[in-house]
Image (cartoon, rainbow, N blue to C red):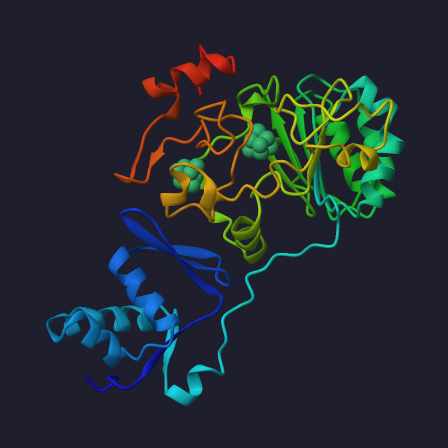
Amino acid sequence: MSNFDKYFVFFSTCFAVNGYNRSLILDLQRRTFLSIPNTMYEIIDLFNSKKSIGEIIEFYGIENSEIINEYVDYLLEKEFGFIANYEEFDNFPAMNRSFEVPSLITNSIIEISHINLGNIKKIIQNLNDFNCTHVQFISYDKILLNDLILLLKESEESDFKSIQFILKYTDEVFEFLPQVINYNKRVTEILFHSSEDITDKIIPPTNFNINFLEYAIRNFKFCGVVNEKYFNQVNKERVLESLNHNSCLYKKIAIDEAGNIKNCPALKKKFGNIQDITLQNAIEINGFTEFWDIKKDEITTCKDCEFRHVCTDCRAFLENPKDKHSKPLKCGYNPYDNIWEDWSLNPLKEEALTYYGFENLKM
Ligand code: SF4
Ligand code: SF4
């Protein structure tokens, strides 16, 4: 009872998210999360509204004091905050949870094709004019080494902070990798699909990651799978973006193989073609920003899910394709019973699977 008149200051870089059955504490500094009971979430909420430990015990009744003190001890042990006096509490204001980025476009996906290679100078110049920071180049078929070198050289002139390549594996990988090192210091990751794991046959690059996928990526329908293993990227920018905007499509632009400008290659709606207009013209077309501000808190089922702010929100494949606030199709998690199942085997998704052409899906 020694802390009865004291206050618990929850670190401003820690953030509790309540779900239907349980909650999460996201630790934005240590980039981890921890599952907690919803009752602990309620107590954290009261701590954050400057209720003393004693006031909370009185609110829940003295018979619950043991559990409340256990929660305090647990949060202290896990280093999610500290005990403070009334006067000290206001010295630790909550973190500003707004999310502002000056660039009109921050991330982009370019499908590699003859059309896009023919317009590559324009594409890179347009993206650079946006101050776009992340670019993904993706190819489903084998690409000539000279074309890859062209992409490397052109994007080296940009201000991109990171470039990711997703490429079909060819034996030319052994020639391509030294070129990446020679020509482009902005490449952060190369993922080869349709490949054996040949990590032990190559000299590991020092400045970018290289990964191999056994299965073939034949089109952009591979994207949008929700899996617990992708939730390990807890970071401040991603969480703040998710609180304020769509966690996948906000400030994203894509160009498909035919040169069509879209929000993402898997979405049907086109906003002109790179052969005819600039990316700057495309984002001004009515509807381009339609998905930018659809937040996880507004999505059916996801709004009750404790993972909603560590989960990327796919708007291209939906359980109900006619409802833009529908749950992502490729999620097998049920926040009402906390069970993960294989989403592709769920009979309730059959209609949507047919709609998107995934009838014979084997993931
Ligand atoms: S229910 Fe929604 S928020 Fe939860 S894991 Fe699935 S897609 Fe993500
Ligand atoms: S909307 Fe879906 S398919 Fe498109 S990039 Fe996002 S997660 Fe991938």
Question: Where in the image, quadrant-wise, is ligand 2 located?
Answer: top right
With respect to residue 133, does 67 lie above or below?
below
Task: Single out the residue that lies furthest toward the front.
Answer: 286
In the drawing, does residue 100 fall left or right of residue 152? left
| Residue 198 in sight | no
Q: Nearer the viewer, residue 227 or 249?
A: 249
The N terminus, quarter of image: bottom left
With respect to residue 29, does 207 lie above or below?
above
Q: Position of residue 93 (x, y in %)?
A: 50, 75
**Residue beneath the point at 49% across and 71% down:** 94
With respect to residue 129, does 239 lie above or below?
below
Q: Quadrant of residue 352?
A: top left
Q: Position of residue 350 (x, y in %)?
A: 39, 15
With respect to residue 348, does 153 lie above or below?
below
In the drawing, does residue 360 fall left or right of residue 304? right
How many marks are shown on the rendered structure? 0
Q: Quadrant of residue 272?
A: top right
Task: Single out the residue that lies furthest toward the left.
Answer: 63
Q: Nearer the viewer, residue 159 or 309?
A: 309
Q: Position of residue 182 (x, y in %)?
A: 83, 40
**Residue beneath the point at 76% across and 17% down:** 258
The C terminus, quarter of image: top left
In the drawing, does residue 42 fall left or right of residue 13? left
Q: Nearer the viewer, residue 220 or 274?
A: 274
| Residue 17 in sight | yes
**Residue beneath the point at 43% across and 87% down:** 88
Q: Position of residue 340 (x, y in %)?
A: 32, 34
